[in-house]
Amino acid sequence: MRAMVQTGFGGPEVLSLTDVPVPVPGPADVLVRVAACGLNQLDVLQRRGDVRLPGLALPHVAGMDVAGVVEAAGEESPVPVGARVVLDPSVPCGACPLCHEGRGGHCPNLRIIGATVDGGLAEYVVAPASAAHVLADTVDLVDAACLPTPWATAFHAVVTVGRLRAGETLLVHAAAGNVGLAAVQIAQRVGAHVIATVGSPEKAAALGKIGVEHIASGPDAVGALVAEVTGGRGVDVVLEYLGPATWATSLAALRIGGRLVFLGNTTGDSVTFSLSDAFHRGLELLGAGGYVPSDMAAALQLFADGGTALVAGSYPLEETGAAQDVLCDRSTVGRVLVIP
Ligand SMILES: [Zn+2]
């Protein structure tokens, strides 16, 4: 089969389209013919060598967010041949104390398809059957490659950790990012109101298309919009992944007893804030942590209810390097897909 194999660390030149053997599934595995693979920043960070997750070994095939059709299944697989599936790239061991506690996202033996073991930038990929989620008939197979990581991450943050409920209001910064787009749509399906911030008119237009009514162009405009939409009360939940650039705005936007869920540090790793303001107002500051398989299943179910997959571009396997360049250009909206 054809695979985009990484043989060193550096620019796109360390990737080469190579003919390799089709992987063989074990008794509890499935072999998936890849229909599309969504790219992630981790693919590029590991290609450059900036990040190397424990277990990464060269040669390596990246590609974490895979949608495809089961071509072969081991005898213990409950997922049949022919099933249309997406793969959850995050595979906890299922046997350690953290897994037993329901914290598989922190499993010390966590394997990540496309990051620590070979992934979906190839015609076929092998995965544990437990990682294969069968798609609803209403979900397009290629669209589904937009889903796994962003939708499971957003569901975990907004619903599992943030406990967002119908009738509440969620504020999402940088909402045109992939996790933001998922969070917005998850909130809509939960029955919550959404206030979004974006950095450009193009991104505002993309959010308008998926039904977001309240959009602030940048953090400076947030306070007034939050006051207007919530009648001065403040929002119930903020999804915060920028860090210092938006932290103060996020705290100020919360109602008394509001929840701040944080899962990123893209503008820096340290913030300062008033302890007395936070404890007097009874704010909950909640680190999101990693999602677990039940988050993935629930997120896929919500997407099947009319969710929109935004695609920034689709590229053939041989143009993976160019596709990764597009991924790194943060002016785009939606997922960058590779179609093997
Ligand atoms: Zn474990």
Image (tube, rainbow, N blue to C red):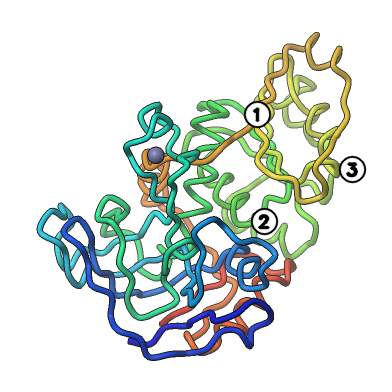
Disc on the earlier residue, 2 or 1: 2
Asked whether the beta carbons under mark 3 and mark 1 sit within 8 Å of each other, the answer is no
Residue 104 position, x and y percent, is 42, 38
Q: Residue visible at 75% across and 24% down? A: 254
Quadrant housing residue 297: top left
Please, what is the three-letter code of the amino acid marked with disc 3?
Asp
The quadrant of the rendering that contains the C terminus is: bottom left
Please, what is the three-letter code of the amino acid marked with disc 2?
Ala
How packed is label 1: few (under 14 Cα within 10 Å), some, or many (20 or more)? many
Q: Nearer the viewer, residue 217 or 101?
A: 101
Is the residue indicated by label 2 positioned so its CB lies within 8 Å of ligand 1?
Answer: no
Residue 68 position, x and y percent, is 32, 69
Q: Nearer the viewer, residue 135 or 12?
A: 12
Q: Is residue 111 above or below residue 330?
A: above
Q: Give the secondary structure at mark 3.
A: helix
Disc on the earlier residue, 3 or 1: 3
Please, what is the three-letter code of the amino acid marked with disc 1?
Val
Q: Residue visible at 49% across and 59% down? A: 55
Can you identify the residue that label 2 sits on?
Answer: 176
Can you identify the residue that label 3 sits on?
Answer: 220
Q: Nearer the viewer, residue 90 or 138?
A: 90
Label 3 and label 2: CA atoms lie apart by 17 Å
Label 3 and label 1: CA atoms lie apart by 18 Å
Q: Which label is found at residue 237?
A: 1
